[in-house]
Image (cartoon, grey):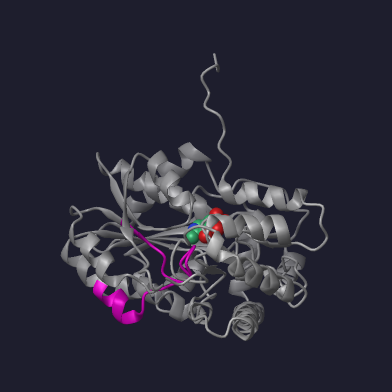
Amino acid sequence: MFNNLPDYVEDPILGLFDAYRADVRTRKANLGIGIYCGEDGRVPVLASVRAARERIDETAPSIYLPTEGLQGYRNAVRELVFGGATADLQDRVVTIQAAGGTGALRVGAEFLASTNASPRVCMPDPTWVNHQAIFQAAGFEVSHCPYRTPKGRFDIDGTLAALNALPAETVVLLHPCCHNPTGIDPSREEWARLLDAMAQRALLPFFDMAYQGFAESLDDDAWAVRECVRREIPCLVASSYSKNFSLYGERVGALSIHAPGLEAAKVLGQLKVVVRRSYSCPPAHGAALVATVLQDAPLHAQWRAELDGMRQRMLGVRASLHALLTRELPDADLSFLLQQRGMFSYSGLSDAQIDQLRSRHGVYVVSSGRVCIAGINASNLAQVCEALVDVMGRAVHAGPAKDAGFNPR
Ligand SMILES: Cc1ncc(COP(=O)(O)O)c(C=O)c1O
C-alpha cells in the first residue's frame, strides 16, 4: 500500500543540527540553526517568561482553546504588530493565534488559496527554506524575485522589475525585518517604493515577521507592516514569538489580516474554517505565557529590556567579529557584517569552504553560507574567526564563492 513513498529528504537546516550534535569534538560551534543563544551558548529562559510561568495555574484542567485562540493573546499580539492605536483597527484587522510563525504562514496560505482558484506567490530569492514548501503545499504557484545585489545590498531595482511583471492579486512574501537568510533589509525609502508598486499593481503583501525587535526596535521593525495599514493596503502578517520570547517549543505565533472594506467577522469565520479542519484549535500554554507578559506592565517592560539585551548582544558579536577579522584580513571589506541585521549574516562562503569549516574546525554553517550570528559568544569567537581566516586563506583553491561577502568578487 505504501510501496511508492518517496525517500525522505532531510530539511538541510535540521539535518545540520543532527550532524552538529553527533560531532564528538568538544571544540565546535553551531552557527547553523536559527536559534538565539546567549553569551553562555544556551537558549535563554527569559526572566519575564519565568515570572509569567509562576503566575499561570499549572494545576488547572487543560481545556480546548477557542479555534481562533486566546482572546487576551490575540489582542496583545495585535498591538505588538500594529502599534498602540489598534482599537481603531477593530473592524479592519483580524488576528488569530497560530502554531508558531510556520503555522501562521500555512493557515494564511490556505485561507488565500480557498479564495482564489489559481493562487500565485512571489517570494525573494533567497528566502527561508520552508517558504516555498508551505505555499506549494497550499496549492500556490511559486515564483521568485531577486533580493541581493552581487555587492551585498538589497536589490531594489530587481525587486521592482519583478513586482511590475506580476499579475494582479499575486501574493508577495516579504520579510519586514531581519531577512532570513541574508540579514539585509530594505530602507524605509525602498519599502515605500515597494509598497507603491504593490498598491499600483494590486498585489497582496504577506509579511513574515519572525524577528520583530531583533533589528532596531519593536516599532521600527514593524514599520513596513504599519505603513501598509496607514496606506490602507490589504495585507497579511504571520508573526512568531519563538525567537523574541525564546519560546521555540511552545509554538506561539499569530496570523493577522488587514482587510479594509471587508467584514472582519467574515474573514475571521473563514480563518476558523481553515484552523478547524487542520488542528482544531491552537496550543494553550505558550500563548498564556506571552499574554501574561504582554498584559502586565512591569513584565512587559522587563521583556522589552530583555529583548533589547538580545539585540545588543548580536550587535556586539557583529562588531567583535568584524574587528577581529579585519585585524587578520586588513584588505578585506567586511562591512557587511555591521550592516546586516538580526540573527543571520550571509557570508558568501563557497560550498568547499563551508565543508572545510565543518570538517577542519567543527564550525557548522548552513550550505547557503548563512551564518547564525547568535550562535557566537566570547568562548567561541576566536575559534570561529580562526576557522574563517583559515578557509578564506584557502579560497583560491576552493571553487567559486556564492556572492559578495567573505569572498568579494
Ligand atoms: C523567516 C522565518 N519565518 C518563519 C519561521 C518559523 O517560525 P516558528 O518557529 O515560530 O514557526 C522562521 C524560523 O526560523 C523564520 O526564519
Residue under the image location 56 percent in, 45 percent down: 11
Depicted 10 relative to depicted 54: above or below: above
The answer to whether 334 is drawn above or below residue 52 in the figure is below
| Residue 146 image-quadrant placement | bottom left
| Residue lying at 70% horizontally and 48% vertically, measured from the top left | 19
How many numbered tags mark residues here? 0
The C terminus is located in which quarter?
bottom left
Residue 83 makes an appearance in the image: yes
- x%, y% of residue 64? 60, 46
Closest to the observer, 288 or 31:
31
> Residue at the location (55% across, 37% down)?
9
From the viewer's perspective, tell me whether residue 247 is left or right of residue 82: right
Residue 109 placed where, x, y %?
A: 38, 48
Span colored in magenta: 172-193
**Residue 301 appears in the rendering:** no
Is 180 in the magenta? yes
Quarter holding residue 36: bottom right
Residue 265 versus residue 218 in the image, above or below: above
Which residue occupies the extreme top position in the image? Answer: 1
Could you tell me residue 159's position as x and y percent? 28, 65
Give yes or no for residue 1 being in the magenta stretch. Answer: no
Left or right: where 3 falls relative to 57: left
Q: Residue 95 appears in which quarter of the rendering?
A: bottom left
Residue 346 placement (x, y as % from top left): 50, 67
Q: Classify the position of the N terminus by image quarter.
A: top right
| Residue at 32 percent of width and 64 percent of height | 91
